[in-house]
Image: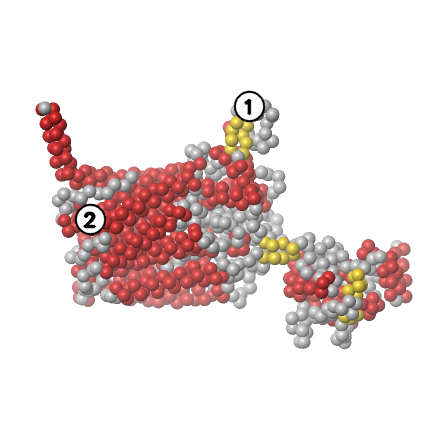
Amino acid sequence: MNHGPVLFLGLVTTLVASWTGLVALPHRQLGALQPDVSTNAAGAVVSYPAARSGEAAQGAEVYRSLGCVACHTQQVRPENGGGDIARGWGKRRTVARDHLFDPTVLLGSSRLGPDLANYGERLGTNSFPLVRLYDPSSVATNSTCAPVTFLFEKRPIRSSGPSSEALVLKGTAAPPAGSEVVPTLRARQLAAYLRSLSTTVELPEALLPLVEDANAPK
Amino acid sequence: MNRPAPTPANANPSCCATGLPVLYLLGGSILWLLAGLGLALLASLKQHQPWLLASCEWVTYGRLDAASRTALVHGFFSQMGLGLGLWLLARTGGTKIAAPGLVFIAGLVWNAILTLGVAGILVEGPSGHTSLELPQQLTTVLTVVMTVLCLLGFATFAKRADGPTVPAQWFVLTALFALPVLAITSQVTLSFFPVRGVLQSVIDGWNGQGLLLLWLAPLALASLYFFIPDIGGRPLRSPAFAKLGFWAWLFFASWTGAASLVGGPVPAWMVTVSIAASVLLLIPVAFISLNLHLVAPVSALGRSTALRFAALSAISFTVVGILIALIAPRCAQQVLGLTQFPVAVRELFLFGFVGPALFAGFYAVVPKLAGREFPCRISPVAHLGLTVIGLGIMVLSSGVGGWLQGWALADGKVGFPEVAAHLQIWLKLHTLGLAVFAFGQTPVLANSAWLLVECLLPFGKPALALFTETSTAGAGK
Amino acid sequence: MSADANQSSPSRSSRAGRGSGLIETVVLLGSAALLVWGGLYVGSYSGRFDGSEFSEVPHGQPAKPVAVSADPNAAVLKAGLKGYNASCVACHQADGNGNPSLNIPPLAGSDWVLAEAPNRIVRIVLHGLGGPVKVKDTVWSGGAMNPWLKTADNPAGLTPDEIAATLSYIRNSWGNKASLVLPEQVAAILKETEKRTDPWTADELLKVPLAAGAPAMAALTPEQLKQALKALPADALEALLKDVKK
């Protein structure tokens, strides 16, 4: 211990061991992960996950750049490990394959906001996240989600008539008469990304429960 | 924003080679501390005031959070730790820092890169990897700079006088060895050739825990191992335990990377191994605490600011070590993971253990290097007092808030808005604590600035005299 | 002074207080106990260090049972998909359309599959099929299907229950819609054909009565219907007619 070389050798050994165990071995196991190919109930061959395309992929970049991950996780924990599934945040736990094509994996480490792993499914077909982005409190009262008003353009209604994309806003967030709030490209990209968030496909390593909990809120 | 500390007129000339770069790193780190805390305070406010500055994209909560963490970890903790570490290597080796000019230049580049990087986070957004938030091009330069500085540390160690090594040296060398390994690995796998899928999260966790437990903690422990016996005037209780504690810390801390991924989408064994390592961290914590706590006589606390900071640090070290072990197992993580509770532990670790350990070194080293005492005697007391009060409020509010948040989240019947609403009061308390804490750090800046002015005055008087002479001469004509 | 303080190893007598050895002993024993715990923990909760094992549940212990399905059909079909993927998909393909280039007939829309009672397809799966067979107006010849019943000679096969589930899946996938195949039906047919070892031929199978009487009408051409009715024994035909009149 009184000699530099012994110390140095010990340092190298310990760190190489840790590097092997938590970097190299995981790379060996997870680096070769492939999408799951199966047949769905309708008989079509599906590959899961599929890479996001177009708007949604660009939206992932917006999501990263705004730092949404600071408040929102994207991981559903198993039913015996927390209330995620009971709360309706997902039907099954998320596994490594769900994130195969995320350019940056944003699992998150804080739940100041709700989990978003399945946000697209929770939104359903009708609701549109754009209003939530502009004024979160209009959708969820007392929401502490920061509005991203800078992704929207507040402009006078054009002579050709109101834009078909203009947000329907109520209360204090509503623009003054004669103006409208329209999403910019980035807002639409972010919304497309949020709608694409879904982990409902069954995987061999993460089966769906056979019956949905009737009490689970949608 | 960082200026080199001047050569003090009355400093021991032999000290200059060691003194300048070290003083530069310490001074720069203080500025980063305040900048980082300012950003953190704004981020903390935005946790419960979402409409604050909402129209400005540069200051979203996510960006502020990442920027403040980067400024604090890479600006304050790393820089001050590195400065102290180099000083400790020179001091314990009875030699001078190798290539002080290069250390100085590397420090300049470090600060320049970090300034750009923090601005980059605010403008472009964080990378998404919590341990490597800086923009890619900048981390490359930063990695090179860090590697150079760590190699210079090894060069300093190689120049040491013959004789047995001491715990402070072991820990500094651990830090200097770990940092390049962590930085290069994360750089390659997360930035240059991003690995696919959740492997990113595993490596991010490994790198993040490594930065805390294998880079900052060893630097802090080196400071404690050196200054507590040095100022307290008593030898370590058990040299054998120092060795055991060192090797056990190195071994277990290096395996804790995936502990926070409980329930996450990574294979179970990675999490299990990291949980076991986190719990087994109790072993080195016990060994090290035993050595540190039973060394300093309580009576010595009264006469040394440095020792008071060291005592706070040693106590926090023991508490945080136990907390890390307690919240690691799955049953605890399933409730407390992903809440504010780990935030409390992290804050206690950084601001309760690492920060005070470094400040202990700061208060002990700076007067030696500057050749004069800190001018204000009240300032360190205020610094310590406000640190303790602010930290207490911060840690308790995050801890209690996180505990309640965790139990509410674990119950699937509680709606999320309700959980978030109940957390509000604790987030507000946390902001209060952080504000007190941040305000508590201003005395050290004021004191340092005052010291700087005092050191500069000897240079200033002749210059002033020269100026007045020439001006009167000019007027006389 | 500091270096000295750090270096010097104090003699035992200079240590502070009495009983200082006690603390060290306790810490060392505690550490040993923790190490043992750590080894056991890693050993039991690491899922054999398998990269696709995400649950920490100790191996050998069954996973927490999932809720019983309100819709038993879903469970059967799910089990059937597994059987299909294990045994059938290589030839008949994931989309159930077979593989014409290898003379593998389709299952999707096949009148054999969709027959109201599964008497014939169960036999095919149990013992295999040889010779030409007409499926969807095409005669598929040359190919031969292996028997899929799990026996001592054929350990890779399916159990009667698995056959029932797999056939149920086949009869209800890719647009197919027919009754589930019950394990009892498979068991009964297995008992009937106990002595058989050779694969069936299409002609033999066409003589097998469809117990419930009629094949699925919609899936049959009039020609096939005639043929099917001819194949029925006289008493069965009578019963069928009675049924239809009702």
Q: Is residue C115 left or right of residue B363?
A: right
User: Which residue matches tag 2?
Assistant: B19
Query: For the residue marked with disc 2, what is the amino acid?
Result: Gly
Could you say which disc has been placed on residue A17 in the image? none
Q: Are marks 1 and 2 on the same chain?
A: no
- The C terminus of chain B, quarter of image: top left
Residue at the (26%, 56%) spot, across then down: B153
The percent coordinates of residue A180 (x first, y second) are 55, 28
Q: Nearer the viewer, residue B265 or A99?
A: A99
The percent coordinates of residue C231 (x first, y second) are 87, 65
The residue furthest front is B477
Labels in figure, total = 2
User: Which residue matches tag 1?
Assistant: A178
Asked whether the viewer can see residue B364, the reply is no
Secondary structure type for disc 1 = loop
Question: How did the renderer colour the structure?
Answer: secondary structure
The percent coordinates of residue A201 (x first, y second) are 60, 53
Looking at the image, is C45 positioned above or below residue B232? below
- The N terminus of chain B, quarter of image: top left
Residue at the (77%, 59%) spot, across then down: C110
Identify the image quadrant of residue A170: top right
Q: Is residue A82 left or right of residue B303?
A: right
Q: Nearer the viewer, residue A90 or A41?
A: A41
Residue at the (29%, 49%) spot, across then down: B106
Give the mark toward the camera: 1 or 2: 2
Query: For the residue marked with disc 1, what is the amino acid?
Result: Gly
